[in-house]
Image: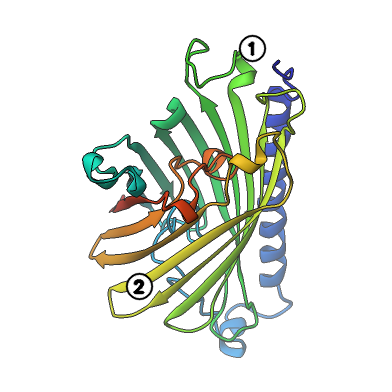
Amino acid sequence: MMAPPTIDFLFMKKYFFVFSCFILLEYCFSVRASAQDMPDGMIDSIAPKKEFVSATFKGTRLVNFHTAETCGKRTLEFRIAHRFGDLSSGGYNFYGLDGPASLQLELGYSYNGRLEFGASRTSADKMYSAYLKYKLMRQTTDNKSPLTITLLGQANLTGLKSTSTSAPEYHFFSDRFNYVSQIMIARKLSDAFSIQVAPTWVHYNLVTAVTDDNDIFSVIGMGRIKVSKRTALTGEYCYRINTYSQDFSTYHNSVAIGMDLETGGHVFQFFFTNSFGINEAQTIPYTRGDITNLDLKLGFNISRVFFL
């Protein structure tokens, strides 16, 4: 039995309204800080300009999840993400390289280096996404601002037909929507080591069983250790807080470990993960891979930036 949709497009409007308020609030504070009762030109001579920490992470995503980084000023990023099948499928399936596979294509753009917007399409569930990402606070070299804090708001549309065996029966167009909200708190501890913690909320308008929750809460932790000028080891883990589904025990926390390789305008990311879905609304609540059974998948992300 399907649970009726609980939130319509009004939810989406409220969602982006709250997100816009964050941006307006931050802008007001920045304007206030710059307005001093001094003659023009004296501020620069008395107080040095802030120097912000750069490259806390080398990409806007680590493996499955967003980092606190946004695209640079007037920069367009094109990203391809790919996941193969399970290693546990054995030699006949060439340890997952024969598939099944999932693929995501994503474009992101920022004009000022702080506010980023983008869109993607994921083959799993034929999901379309649009997101806004805003760097609210930036870590400074003098540690007066010790953290980088970035906000994420994302809306997803499931494109699967209701006749699909893996899809619920969608009675209304709003049933197909789900949303992701995230606060990313990151710090670059040294030139070689960065960490991030991200409280995350996923909301589904339509759930599979009437006893299931529409809201899923989780905390995502990730880290990056630089081992050479262009190479780093990466890892991330998602802990699900609430038992949102009657089938909760059949799903698992998302885990990934990998390597970043930077080559000019490209960033290559190779990794193993137990998640087949790539979108957060798939990865956080519905990861089926059990790492104790070696249900790991080889995957890669490739990103290319263009300066416009």
Q: Amino acid at mark 1?
A: Phe
Q: Residue at x 22, y 40 (%)?
A: 92
- Which of the 4 image quadrants contains residue 267? bottom left
Residue 68 seen in the figure: no
Label at residue 232 = 2
Distance between the alpha carbons at the discs numbered 2 and 1: 46 Å
Q: Find residue 218 and report its horizontal and vertical position in percent.
A: 67, 51
Which one is in front, 205 or 1? 1
Residue 154 seen in the figure: yes
Label at residue 85 = none
Q: Residue furthest bottom?
A: 46
Measured along the vertical axis of the image, is residue 40 above or below residue 92? below
Mark 1: secondary structure:
loop
Measured along the vertical axis of the image, is residue 235 above or below residue 219? below
Residue neighbourhood size for the residue with mark 2, other residues' Cα within 10 Å, grouped as few (<14), some (14–19), many (≥20): many
Mark 2: secondary structure:
strand
Q: Find residue 58 and report its horizontal and vertical position in percent.
A: 39, 66
In the image: residue 82, left or right of residue 183:
left
Which residue, given by chain and number where applicable, does mark 1 sit on?
A: 172
Which one is in front, 9 or 279? 279
**How is the rendered protein coloured?**
rainbow
Q: Residue at x 50, y 61 (%)?
A: 236
Q: Find residue 75 and report its horizontal and vertical position in percent.
A: 36, 53
Q: Quadrant of the N terminus?
A: top right
